Image (cartoon, rainbow, N blue to C red):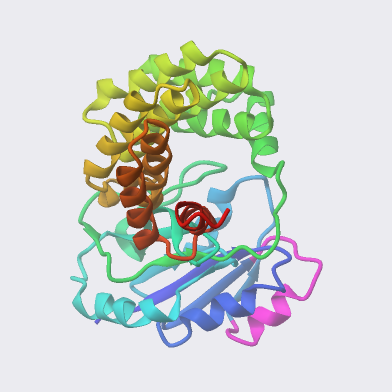
C-alpha cells in the first residue's frame, strides 16, 4: 500500500481548516500545512492535527508555495487540497482502496473534483484534477495562478474517490486578476493556458470586450489544450451576448464544432440561443441532442452534469408546450423530475399541468 502526505497552503482559514483536516484523518500518513501569512488562528488549528506546520512568504505565486509544500513531504505520494476542500465520508473507502491498489511506480493520479453543488447537494460542476503526485517523480506545479502539474508519465485515473469543494464564504474576488496583471506589468508573456484563464478572469469582472479579444487571440494560436479551446468558444459566446452581439455569439458557439462532436454543454448553449429567438423546434433539436451525448468525465473537461439530463429535459418541457405538444411536455417534465425531484421548476410545472396555478 502506498503512503501519502497531505500538502496544503493556507492563509486565514481558521473557519474551514479543521473540517478539511478531519476529512482526511486516517487516510494519509502525514499532513504538511504551509501558512502564507495568516493573521488569525489558522496555524493553531493546524497544529492540533500535525506538527509539520511551516511558514512561507507569499509572493503572488501559487506554484512556488505549493512546490514548497511538496518539498516538505516525506511519504511516497503528495495529495494537495485547499482548506475549503474535503473528502466526503462516502469517498473514504474508495480512497483507501486506491492506496491499496495503486502501483508504486505511478506518477500521477487523476481524481474527480466536485467544484459546485445545487440546492440538493448534487454536483453541478465536476472535472478531473491531478491530485496525487509521486514525490520523487520530478513533477512540479507550474503557473503563478490556476497552477497545475502536467499529468505525464504513468498516469492513473480513479473514479472511486473524489475531492469536494465546500466553500463557506467568498474569497478575494480580485486575487487572480491581480496576479495576472502583475505578471503583465513585469513584461511576462502569458502561455496559452494563462491567456485562457486570464480571459476568464476578465469576463468574470465584467470586462467583456477585453475578454472577448483575448479569447479570440487564444483560439487563433491553435496552441491551447483542446478542452480549454472548447470552453473558450463557449465563454467567448457569453461575452459577445452580453455585448449585444447575438449573431457573433452564435458563430463562436458554432466554431466549437470544429473540435469534434458537440458536448452536451455546447448543445444546451445552442438550444438556449434558439430558445431565446423563439425558434422552439430548433431549440428542441439541440436539447434532444444533448440527451444523446456521453459524459466526457475522464477527459479533464469542465463537466456540467445537469446538461446531460435535467437541463435539456426541463427546457424540452417548455419547448414542446409552446409547440402545442402537451403530452411530450409532460413527459419531459417527468424526466426532469427523475433527475431532480426537489427542483422548484419541476414542481411548479407539475402544479401547472394539474391545473393548480
In this orientation, does residue 215 appear?
yes
Magenta highlight range: 35-51
Report the residue at 59% width, 78% height from top: 19
**Position of 66 compared to 168: left or right?**
left
Q: In front: 250, or 217?
A: 250
Any magenta on residue 125? Answer: no
Task: Place residue 35 in its image quadrant.
Answer: bottom right
Which residue is outermost to the right?
39
User: Compared with residue 118, is residue 204 higher up or lower down, i.e. above or below?
Assistant: above
Q: Quadrant of residue 221?
A: top left
Point out residue 242 in the picture as x, y percentages from the top left corner.
61, 22
The reply, left or right, for residue 136 in relation to residue 85 is left
Query: Which residue corresponds to the image point at 61% horizontal and 46% vertical from the top-left?
Result: 61
Q: Quadrant of the N terminus?
A: bottom left
- The vertical placement of 72 against 58, above or below, is below
Q: x, y percentage for residue 328? A: 30, 44
**Closer to us: 204 or 36:** 204
**Residue at 35%, 42% in the rendered image:** 326
| Residue 225 shows in this picture | no
The relative height of residue 34 versus residue 184 in the rendered view (above or below) is below
- Residue 261 point in image, percent of width and height: 21, 30
**Is 340 in front, or is 193?**
340
Q: Does residue 234 appear to the left or right of 46 in the view shown?
A: left
- The extreme front residue here reads 355
Q: Does residue 40 belong to the magenta stretch?
A: yes
Q: How many marks do you count on the picture? A: 0
Near-viewer residue (336 or 8): 336
Position in image of residue 185 (x %, y %)? 69, 25
Amino acid at each position: 500500500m502506498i503512503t501519502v502526505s497531505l500538502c496544503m497552503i493556507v492563509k486565514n482559514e481558521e473557519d474551514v481548516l479543521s473540517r478539511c483536516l478531519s476529512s482526511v484523518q486516517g487516510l494519509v500518513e502525514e499532513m504538511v500545512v504551509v501558512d502564507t501569512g495568516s493573521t488569525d488562528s489558522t496555524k493553531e488549528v493546524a497544529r492540533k492535527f500535525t506538527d509539520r506546520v511551516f511558514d512561507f512568504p507569499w509572493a503572488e505565486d501559487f506554484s512556488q508555495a505549493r512546490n514548497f509544500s511538496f518539498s516538505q513531504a516525506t511519504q511516497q505520494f503528495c495529495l494537495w487540497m485547499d482548506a475549503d476542500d474535503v473528502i466526503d465520508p462516502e469517498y473514504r473507502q474508495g480512497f483507501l482502496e486506491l492506496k491499496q491498489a495503486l502501483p508504486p511506480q505511478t506518477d500521477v493520479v487523476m481524481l474527480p473534483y466536485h467544484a459546485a453543488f445545487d440546492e440538493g447537494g448534487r454536483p453541478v460542476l465536476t472535472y478531473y484534477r491531478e491530485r496525487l503526485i509521486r514525490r520523487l517523480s520530478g513533477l512540479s506545479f507550474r503557473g503563478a495562478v490556476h497552477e497545475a502539474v502536467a499529468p505525464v508519465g504513468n498516469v492513473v485515473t480513479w473514479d472511486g474517490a473524489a475531492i469536494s469543494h465546500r466553500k463557506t464564504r467568498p474569497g478575494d474576488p480580485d486575487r487572480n486578476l491581480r496576479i495576472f496583471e502583475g505578471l503583465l506589468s513585469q513584461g511576462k508573456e502569458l502561455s496559452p493556458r494563462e491567456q485562457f484563464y486570464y480571459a476568464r478572469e476578465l469576463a468574470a469582472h465584467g470586462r467583456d470586450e477585453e475578454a472577448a479579444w483575448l479569447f479570440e487571440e487564444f483560439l487563433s494560436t491553435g496552441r491551447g489544450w483542446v478542452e480549454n479551446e472548447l470552453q473558450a468558444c463557449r465563454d467567448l459566446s457569453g461575452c459577445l451576448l452580453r455585448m449585444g452581439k447575438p449573431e457573433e455569439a452564435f458563430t463562436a458557439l458554432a466554431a466549437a464544432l470544429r473540435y469534434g462532436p458537440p458536448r452536451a454543454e455546447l448543445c444546451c448553449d445552442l438550444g438556449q440561443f434558439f430558445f431565446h429567438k423563439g425558434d422552439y423546434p430548433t431549440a428542441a433539436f439541440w436539447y434532444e441532442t444533448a440527451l444523446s451525448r456521453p459524459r466526457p468525465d475522464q477527459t479533464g473537461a469542465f463537466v456540467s452534469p445537469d446538461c446531460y439530463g435535467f437541463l435539456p429535459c426541463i427546457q424540452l418541457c417548455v419547448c414542446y408546450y409552446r409547440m402545442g405538444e402537451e403530452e411530450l411536455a409532460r413527459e419531459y417534465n417527468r424526466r426532469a423530475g427523475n433527475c431532480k425531484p426537489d427542483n422548484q421548476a419541476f414542481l411548479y410545472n407539475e402544479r401547472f399541468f394539474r391545473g393548480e396555478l
